[in-house]
Structures are given as structure tokens and as C-alpha cells.
Image (spheres, rainbow, N blue to C red):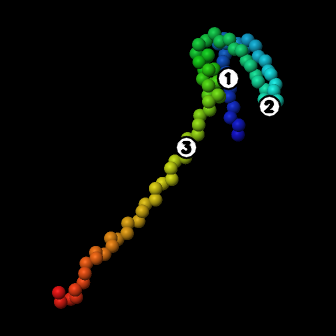
């Protein structure tokens, strides 16, 4: 699914002054000139444009869980054996 962007503002908050297109070999450039009369509407439009230009990066995957190491019994002590009558 493609991600889309919508720039909305009321007719009393601003208007489109002009727009034009320029076609190239690989892409078409659309230039829109807006005249905003409401500063809050201007900030919303700028925030939308910024989010379109810099999309949020996906969160990195969580690290794999650490595997528990099995505790082995301690090795036997290297004591000499002198027999049963010692």
C-alpha cells in the first residue's frame, strides 16, 4: 500500500495563487504557490510538507532474546587418593 499525503485548509485560511508543472525524463515537477492568511493553517501545511519530505523511520527490530547458558557441575577436585586405611 502506498503512503499518501493530503494538504487541507479552509477557503478562509488561504488560497492557491498559481500552479505549474514541468515534465522531465524521469519525473514531473509540480509547483504550487499558496497564499495563507491564517498562521495556524500555515503551520499545519508546513508540518504536512515536512512529514512528506522526511517520513518517519521504521523502528529497529528488537534484539533477539539472550539464551540462557546451562550451568554445568563443577569439575572434581584433583586430590590424591591413598586408599581406605589412610
Residue wearing tag 1: 7
Mark 3 or mark 2, whichever is nearer to me: 2
79 on left or right of 42: left
Q: CA distance from mark 3 to mark 2?
A: 32 Å
Q: Earlier in the sequence, mark 3 or mark 1?
A: 1
Residue 60 is labelled as 3
Q: Secondary structure at mark 2?
A: loop
- Residue 33 in percent (x, y) is at 71, 15
At label 2, counting other C-alpha atoms closer than 10 Å, the crowd grade (few under 14, some 14-19, many 20 or more) is few
- Residue 52 in percent (x, y) is at 65, 28
Q: CA distance from mark 1 to mark 2?
A: 25 Å
Quadrant of the drawing holding the N terminus = top right
Residue wearing tag 2: 26
Q: CA distance from mark 3 to mark 1?
A: 29 Å
Mark 3 or mark 1, whichever is nearer to me: 3
Mark 1 or mark 2, whichever is nearer to me: 2
Quadrant of the drawing holding the C terminus = bottom left
At label 1, counting other C-alpha atoms closer than 10 Å, the crowd grade (few under 14, some 14-19, many 20 or more) is few
Amino acid at each position: 500500500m502506498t503512503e499518501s499525503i493530503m494538504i487541507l485548509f479552509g477557503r478562509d485560511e488561504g488560497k492557491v495563487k498559481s500552479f505549474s508543472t514541468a515534465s522531465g525524463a524521469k519525473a514531473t515537477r509540480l509547483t504550487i504557490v499558496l497564499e495563507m492568511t491564517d498562521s495556524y493553517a500555515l503551520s499545519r501545511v508546513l508540518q504536512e510538507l515536512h512529514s512528506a519530505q522526511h517520513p518517519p523511520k521504521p523502528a529497529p527490530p528488537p534484539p533477539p532474546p539472550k539464551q540462557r547458558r546451562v550451568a554445568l557441575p563443577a569439575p572434581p577436585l584433583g586430590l590424591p587418593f591413598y586408599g581406605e586405611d589412610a
